[in-house]
Image (cartoon, grey):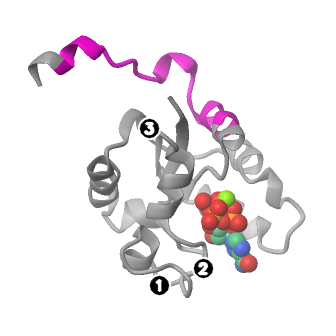
Amino acid sequence: MEQTYLMIKPDGVQRGLIGRIVSRLEDKGFKLVAAKLITVTDEQAKKHYAEHAGKDFFPNLVTFITSGPVFAMVWEGDDVVALSRLLIGKTRVGEALPGTIRGDFASHTPLNLIHGSDSPESAEREIFNFFAADELAKYNKDIAAWL
Ligand code: RTP
Ligand code: MG
């Protein structure tokens, strides 16, 4: 089953949006595999945003993502990488449609609330930048019988 790395950024945590964002992902039917409130280190941030190294907004990106706690998560589901990015919405607030997380809650592009991996390969790299393998839950399928 495909997995993705989603991270509620410091603005989402400080605005008290963890619950509502997690609800949307649960409502969609994705399965939560790991979650923790952490403060991203400088080293993790530079690794996470390596594709943007050298761009003019890179220093601000690293400063922002390390500025306060984030809610790091791993979610699982069919096509979860692409589908979760649909729920998140476009990067720029002017393009993020109503109904998406960014479209409904974000009004300033750098503060766009949540990160989502952009490919299964990025997801694998990003998950293990923030989680150890033994932090990922394994669901016992037998439990479905009495849910
Ligand atoms: P993210 O990685 O955070 O999920 O966002 P994304 O895929 O939608 O966007 P990406 O292109 O990966 O950019 C990462 C973050 O950098 C900031 N950004 N600023 N000033 C700019 O032109 C610009 N472009 C990107 C955004 O905060 C974006 O989330
Ligand atoms: Mg990205």
User: Is residue 98 visible to the viewer in this orientation of the structure?
Assistant: yes
> Would you place residue 87 above or below residue 29 in this image?
below
**Residue 129 drawn at (x, y percent):** 66, 35
Query: Which residue in the structure is indicated by mark 1?
Result: 107
Q: Identify residue type, mark 2.
A: Arg
Check disc 1: other Cα within 10 Å, few if <14, some if 14-19, many if 20+.
some
Mark 2 and ligand 1: say if the CB distance to the nearest ligand atom is below 8 Å. yes
The span from disc 3 to disc 1 (Cα, nearest Å) is 29 Å
The circle drawn on residue 14 is: none
Residue toward you, 30 or 66: 30
User: Is residue 8 visible to the viewer in this orientation of the structure?
Assistant: no
Query: Which residue in the structure is indicated by mark 2?
Result: 92
Number of the front mark, 3 or 1: 3
Which residue is depicted at the point 29% across and 47% down? 26
Query: Which residue in the structure is indicated by mark 3?
Result: 77
**Residue 101 drawn at (x, y percent):** 41, 68
Which residue is depicted at the point 50% across and 51% down? 7
Among the 4 quarters of the image, the one containing residue 130: top right
Element on which disc 2 rests: loop
Q: Ligand 1, what quadrant?
A: bottom right
Which region is colored magenta?
A: 124-144
**45 with respect to 96 (left or right):** right
Kindly report the secondary structure that dominates the magenta region of the rendered protein. Answer: helix
Element on which disc 3 rests: loop
Is residue 132 shown in magenta? yes
The span from disc 2 to disc 3 (Cα, nearest Å) is 26 Å
